[in-house]
Amino acid sequence: MDLVLPLWFEIGSLVVLTLILIGDLLLILKRPHIPSTRESTLWVVFYVTLALIFAGLMWVFAGGEFAGQFIAGWLTEYSLSIDNLFVFVLIMSQFSVPRRYQQEVLMVGIIIALVLRGLFILVGAAVIENFSPIFYVFGAFLVWTAYRQAFPGGDHDSDVKQENFVVRLLRRVIDISDHYDGKKIRTVIDGKKVWTPMVIVFVAIGVTDLLFAVDSIPAIFGITQSAFIVFTANIFALMGLRQLYFLLGDLLDRLRYLHYGIAFILGFIGVKLVLHAMHVNELPFINGGEHIEWAPEISTWMSLGVIIVSMAVATVASLVASARENRARTDVEAAATVADEKGTPPPVAQPDESEVKPDAR
């Protein structure tokens, strides 16, 4: 069943979303500042509400199935975009970007992400249309990505290390100053025009967006094959991302189990894609080129349920673990204070079980 929407709805939606993004960018350029918690919250609520309204319109014009595909795709991309924020935090910290200019950097990163994902979506839609066995490739890739997400090795630092190679290459090609000049990417030093470190930040953000686009586009194509839904879900996921960056702040460090939730989602969608590929199989060396009828088709609503439950469990588990750790730290500090007042040796904090190395047990 193909998505059928009024042409005016598709064009109108893209025009409205583009105008909102342009307005958001102009607002940043006109008034660079560090948004307050209240401001960030209102913007995030606005964009989430906008996405839900769009889903409602999809339900009216195309039916519940496609509305469910949009919500599932949007939530998947939103969760992956939040994972993006971890790397953005590392990049901002590594290059010491002044906090009041971080909004501009994030907005540029979002625009780069939209362009890159738009290109990936066009290519992905064309490949799916003409080569259905690509679902086997997408599925296997997502399962491997899920494993890498669950057991990252060097965690998000590895992404920054990949970017360092690009940064070193960039420094060899162009002259880059050691200091920022406001939000400028070009400045004049001793009468000579040079680039500021801001250009390095933009390149690092762009490389990050490229890496994440490679992971996220196959994931959403595992939920829907409609290029329109894929693209709008990406737009809504990226809208409000910069406000979410400032809203979450230090909370990002507390979401320690988020990557497990994302890994489970990617693994689930990877398996779903493989099962779909088996169901519509055309490869001659698999089942004689015939469809594998026993392979089940996982419904959109089951996918949506798995996505919501996975993110909820990962978030709640992270916050509970963080709260327990904070209480333990507070108890140790209080005991140390009492011991200091009484002149007795302070208690020794017990190491976290998860931090004890196997050979030390």
Image (spheres, rainbow, N blue to C red):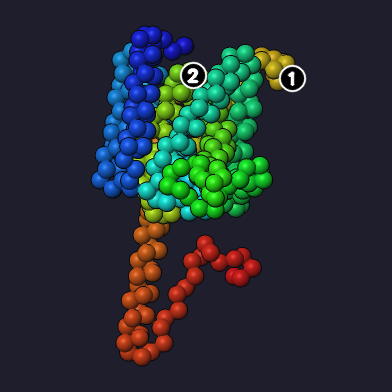
Residue type at mark 2: give it.
Ala
Q: Say left or right for 305 vs 177.
A: left
Residue 75 place in picture, x, y as percent? 41, 33
Residue 22 place in picture, x, y as percent? 37, 28
Judging from the image, what secondary structure is the residue with disc 2 in? Answer: helix
Mark 1: few, some, or many residues within 10 Å (few <14, many ≥20)?
A: few
Residue type at mark 1: give it.
Phe
Earlier-in-chain disc, 1 versus 2: 2
Viewer-nearest residue: 35 or 119: 35
Question: Is 223 situated above or below 161?
Answer: above
Q: Say left or right for 6 vs 280.
A: left
Pick the quarter of the image with the C terminus. bottom right
Question: Is 8 situated above or below 111?
Answer: above
The residue carrying mark 2 is 227
Q: Residue at x 40, y 46 (%)?
A: 101
The residue carrying mark 1 is 285
Mark 2: few, some, or many residues within 10 Å (few <14, many ≥20)?
A: some
Mark identifier at residue 26: none
Question: Is 211 situated above or below 33?
Answer: above
Q: Is residue 257 visible?
A: no
Viewer-nearest residue: 195 or 24: 195
Viewer-nearest residue: 10 or 93: 93
Residue 179 place in picture, x, y as percent? 50, 53
